[in-house]
Amino acid sequence: MSEKRSNRTFFLGIVVAVLLPLFFYEVTNVLSKNKVKMPGYYHIDKITVSADGKAGNDTLYHKVNDSITLTNQFGQPVALNKELQGKIVVVDFIFTNCASSCPRLTRSMKLLQTSFRKDPKKEARLDTIIRFVTITINPERDSFQVMRAYADKYGADPDNWWFLTGDKRAIYNFARNELGVATGPGDGGAEDFIHSEQLVLIDKDRYIRGYYSGLNDTDVRHCADDIVLLNIEWKHRK
């Protein structure tokens, strides 16, 4: 079973890596004709209401706050919005001794990173637009040294994939209240535990633009497509 799954993942990796540049080219050609459905926005913060009590036209969607500073796999403090300004970001949550869904989540992130790898022969340098962020949900165990060993195990390129650890309460507040990957109350205390299989796509303006199951091959491909769409959307707004 594991061999079949590995072969399927390998095949998907080849398909994504080969078709992504073609997808990028085709979308560029048809976007101006409004034939492509762009990724939506998530989590409404506010809807304006007119004097007569009717909803106005302005809907304010949630922007991911930069109130969190974590530590990357090299022991360096990083603030996500500040350090990754102008980048599209994909975030997932794992813990390094997880033996169930976390390895599959990490392989999905690895697949996405491979799909957006540097290729000097191609005009579209897609690797420059995207950064991947993996955050531990068990920071008491997962020190930055442990996160670095985990990153190395999966061959992560540190130039565009960070593995972060830090204060548990801050991480859980970020996951729950900024990214919305968990429902229900929680304070990040000893009994609080968030274990999400989702990949969260955040655009350059820090709006959430997609949730994808990291355990579903089709969803991972959809995430890759949406990354390209967000980059083209940004270029058309300039």
Image (spheres, helix red, strand yellow):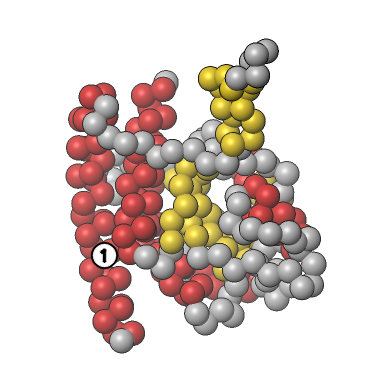
Q: Is residue 168 visible?
A: yes
Residue at point 66% right, 55% down? 176
Image height check: is 226 above or below 91?
above
Q: Residue 118: x and y, percent?
A: 34, 50
Residue at point 20% right, 37% down? 26
Identify residue type, mark 1: Leu
Residue at point 62% right, 41% down? 64
Most foreground residue, 43 or 49: 49
Residue 111, located in which quarter of the rendered image?
bottom left
Which image quarter holds the C terminus?
Answer: top left
Q: Is residue 163 visible?
A: no
Residue at point 68% right, 42% down? 66
Q: Secondary structure at mark 1?
A: helix
Which residue is tagged 1?
12
Image height check: is 154 above or below 23?
below
Which image quarter holds the N terminus?
Answer: bottom left
Residue 27, located in which quarter of the rendered image?
top left
Most foreground residue, 170 or 82: 170
* Position of residue 96 in the picture relative to residue 234 (left or right): right
Q: Residue 201: x and y, percent?
A: 48, 48
Q: Residue 232: x and y, percent?
A: 35, 33
* Position of residue 47 in the picture relative to residue 225 (left or right): right
Residue 188, located in which quarter of the rendered image?
bottom right
